[in-house]
Structures are given as C-alpha cells and as structure tokens.
Image (cartoon, rainbow, N blue to C red):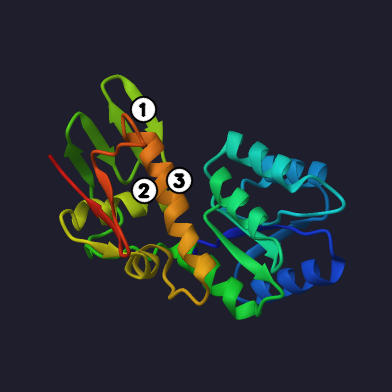
Amino acid sequence: MEVDIKKILVIEEEDAIRQNLVTNLTNLGYLVISASEGKEAMEIFEKEQPHLVVLHIVSSQFDGYKVFKKIREKAPTPIIILTSLGSPRDRVRGLHLGADDFVIKPFFPEELEARISSILQGTNNQNNTPNNEEKVYRFSDLIFDKNKRQIARNDSIIKLTKIEASLLELLIIKAGNKLSRVFILDKVWGYTPERNIDMRIVDVHIARLRSKLEKDPSKPDFILTVRGTGYVFQRD
C-alpha cells in the first residue's frame, strides 16, 4: 500500500529557525525541503511542487511578498506565513494576498505543526462525507464544485484555494444560520482563536470569497455580515 507523504517547502532566511523547522516537520513524517532566499525558493517550488509552503514573509534577504505572488501565480498551493509579533500590517497584507494562515514569531513548534496538519488534512468535516464524493452546489447563476475547487458562472470559471473552498462549503451547508468567527475558525482552520488577530483570518477570507462570487462585493447577495457575530449565507 502506497503511503501518501506530504511535501513541505520551508522558506526561511535564519539558519537556526529553518533547520529546526526542517527537523521537527521531518520527525512528524513530512518530506521537507528548504530554501533561504527567493530565487532558490522558486526553483525548488517549480521542481518539487510541494503540498504546502511555510514562508517567512518579512526578510532582509529577499522580498517575501514577491515570492508569495510568484507562487500564487503558478499554483493554489496552501501557504502559511511566518511573521513577527510587532507587524500586524504584514499579517493582514499576507492574508489579503491569499495566505491560508499565519503563525507569529516566536512560536511553539506545536502551534505551526497544528496549523499545517489542519490545512493538509482538511478539517472541514462538517458534512461527514467521503473526500471523493461529488460535492456540487448550485445557487443563483453559480455552480460550486468543491472537489475541483472552482465556481462556474455562465462560461466563466473562478478558481478557489483549498481554504476558500472549505469556507464556502461550510457557509452553504449552514445557509440561513448565523455563524460566529470562532465557529468558522474551528470548522475550517481547525483551531480556537487565541488572539484577536486570529479573527482577521476569517474576515479576509470572507472578503476574498465575496470578490470571487458576488456581483458587487460591497453589497453582497450571498455572504452577509451579522454585526457583532460573524456571517450568514443567504441562498435565493
């Protein structure tokens, strides 16, 4: 029986942190490759096609945002950004670019490991259906295919990241129910928020989803904000 070993690319300029990440993740059973600067990182990414990328977004050696954008142009590979405690703008900017999650330096190895596991394994098991079961949802003039991670409107195809697809499926399944940000984080990302900034992950991903499926994201028809709570999905 063939074992599905997940491949992770770690992009981190600090040798000690990079080596610790490689060692810890390798011990967990992942196949880990690493890079310390942007050009090397892109060469490895194109050659190895990892399942997930851990990227130190703010670096003195290379432009982490440029690397991020290049990766996103080539594939919807999940990306977890590493950022320092004192740089909330960098965290928000990284999320707006399409990061799946972030971890604040300094961090406990167990925290990063949990975030990686949640994204790779897929924590959105709210419908308890097999991964290979067809999951197609229709609403208004849209067709959402969860397995293909795409939305079709007429002849237009809109690609989604894994997290975006999981988030949209949760919203659709729970249509009409007011979902708190804490509930969404638990079901989609697989953890309970410890900081207020964790809530920002949900808001940014909701904004990205709206930009992809709403005709006017500033006046959404489907994903509505519930003030002081979270969000509710409205099907026509």
CB contact under 8 Å: marks 2 and 3? yes
**Mark found first going from the N terminus, 2 or 1:** 1
Question: Residue drawn at (43%, 58%), measured in percent from left and top?
Answer: 202
Q: Residue furthest top?
A: 155
Residue lying at 59% horizontally and 62% vertically, measured from the top left: 102
Neighbour tally class for label 3: few under 14, some 14-19, many 20 plus, Cα within 10 Å:
many
- Kindly give the residue lying farthest to the left in the view shown: 236
Circle 3 residue: 161
Label 1 belongs to which residue? 157
* Kind of residue sitting beneath label 2: Ala
Q: Where is residue 21 shown, x and y percent of the image?
A: 72, 70
Residue nearest the viewer, comparing 189 with 90: 90
Question: Looking at numbered disc 3 in the image, what kind of residue is underneath it?
Answer: Thr
The amino acid pointed to by label 1 is Ile
SS at badge 2: helix
Residue at image mark 2: 165
Please name the residue shown 83% across and 47% down the image. Answer: 62
User: Mark 1, residues whose alpha carbon is within 10 Å: few (<14), some, or many (≥20)?
Assistant: few
Q: Is residue 2 visible?
A: no
Give percent across and percent down for residue 106: 72, 75
- Residue 136, by quadrant, is top left
| SS state under label 3 | loop
- Quadrant where the N terminus sits is bottom left
Q: Toward the viewer: 83 or 51?
A: 83
